Image (cartoon, helix red, strand yellow):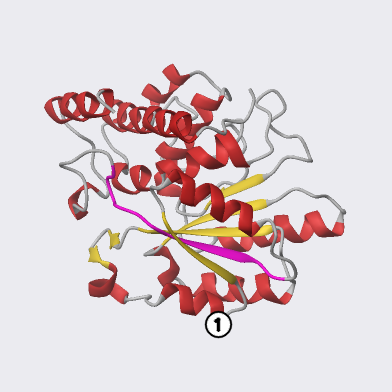
């Protein structure tokens, strides 16, 4: 499959990714729709435009890597992988089934296209660092992407890893912070404010880019700029809306980790069907 470069086509594909998220969480009767929907546009651009990947060779050593550090938002990753051809979209309906390989958090051993098993918050950037360092040691030109949650960066290991990213001048690493301002217990400010996020990453030695995480054109431009940065890692702070695309889920903390009932599922799919 060729890369999708047309913005309108990427927006349509992002809508399909959102449908897959809702389909998965509804059929699984559990999961995390809010944060999955907030990264749908970012993950669509990554898998359909930005990343050098091949569904027929999911373990190709030259491929770009993605570490979904906020692993509970696996429905977004699964939907992107399925729509990209790593497995059938029908399999999304098996989310969290005891016999399914699509468990609540990504599993690199059983799911084609998953580059890192994640779920314990705060650990993904350390893994991404390792991949980026390995790429440099092996003289590979692949890039490593790491998606963090804005609540997740309250974890201290993130900042230890950020220091390492800068120390080793990992210009093949691009961190994306999903800044939807909500975590399981409330707003970021109420729980443990990590603001100003951009100034923190800048002080840790990152090149920082602030974008609207739902504007496809801004996302594309940010990734292009990131590839030009040398001698330091890049952090894209993406301002997003939790539950984006489903009006009754948007900016509602209650949709952090629950599945829609049948009526809500139908309402959500009608909305996405009109997009």
**Residue 147 visible in image:** yes
Whether residue 263 sits left or right of residue 22 in the image: it is left
Query: Would you call the spot at circle 1 few (<14 residues within 10 Å), some (14-19), or many (20 or more)?
Result: few
- Residue at the (22%, 73%) spot, across then down: 190
Looking at the image, how many numbered discs can be counted on the residues? 1
Quadrant assignment for the C terminus: top left
In the rendered view, tell whether residue 56 sits above or below residue 43. above
Q: Which residues are magenta?
A: 232-244
Q: Is residue 212 magenta?
A: no
Percent coordinates x, y for residue 246 in the rendering? 22, 38
Q: Which residue is mark 1?
A: 203
* Residue furthest bottom in the image: 203
Rendering coords of residue 255 (x, y %): 22, 47
Quadrant location of the N terminus in the rendered image:
top right
The image shows residue 221 at horizontal and vertical percentages of 55, 52
**Horizontal arrangement in the rendering, residue 144 relative to residue 201 (left or right):** right
Q: Is residue 97 visible?
A: no
Q: Residue furthest left?
A: 263
Which residue occupies 67% across, 34% down?
Answer: 53
């Amino acid at each position: 499959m060729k890369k999708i470069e047309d913005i309108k086509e990427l927006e349509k594909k992002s809508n399909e990714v959102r449908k897959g998220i809702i389909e998965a969480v509804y059929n699984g009767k559990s999961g995390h729709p809010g944060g999955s929907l907030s990264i749908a546009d970012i993950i669509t651009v990554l898998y359909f435009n930005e990343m050098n990947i091949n569904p027929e060779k999911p373990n190709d050593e030259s491929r770009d890597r993605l570490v979904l550090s906020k692993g509970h938002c696996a429905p977004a990753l699964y939907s992107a992988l399925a729509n990209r051809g790593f497995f059938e979209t029908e399999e999304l309906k098996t989310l969290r089934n005891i016999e399914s390989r699509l468990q609540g958090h990504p599993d690199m051993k059983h799911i084609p296209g998953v580059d890192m098993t994640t779920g314990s918050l705060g650990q993904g950037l350390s893994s991404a660092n390792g991949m980026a360092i390995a790429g440099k040691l092996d003289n590979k030109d692949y890039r490593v992407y790491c998606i963090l949650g804005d609540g997740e960066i309250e974890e201290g290991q993130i900042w230890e890893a950020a220091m390492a990213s800068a120390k080793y001048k990992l210009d093949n690493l691009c961190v994306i912070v999903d800044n939807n301002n909500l975590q399981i217990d409330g707003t970021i400010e109420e729980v443990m404010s990590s603001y100003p996020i951009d100034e923190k990453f800048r002080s840790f030695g990152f090149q920082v880019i602030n974008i609207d995480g739902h504007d496809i054109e801004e996302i594309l431009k940010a990734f292009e700029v990131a590839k030009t940065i040398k001698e330091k890692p890049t952090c894209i702070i993406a301002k997003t809306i939790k539950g984006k695309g489903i009006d009754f889920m948007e900016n509602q903390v209650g949709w952090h980790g629950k599945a829609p009932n049948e009526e809500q599922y139908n309402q959500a799919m009608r909305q996405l069907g009109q997009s």
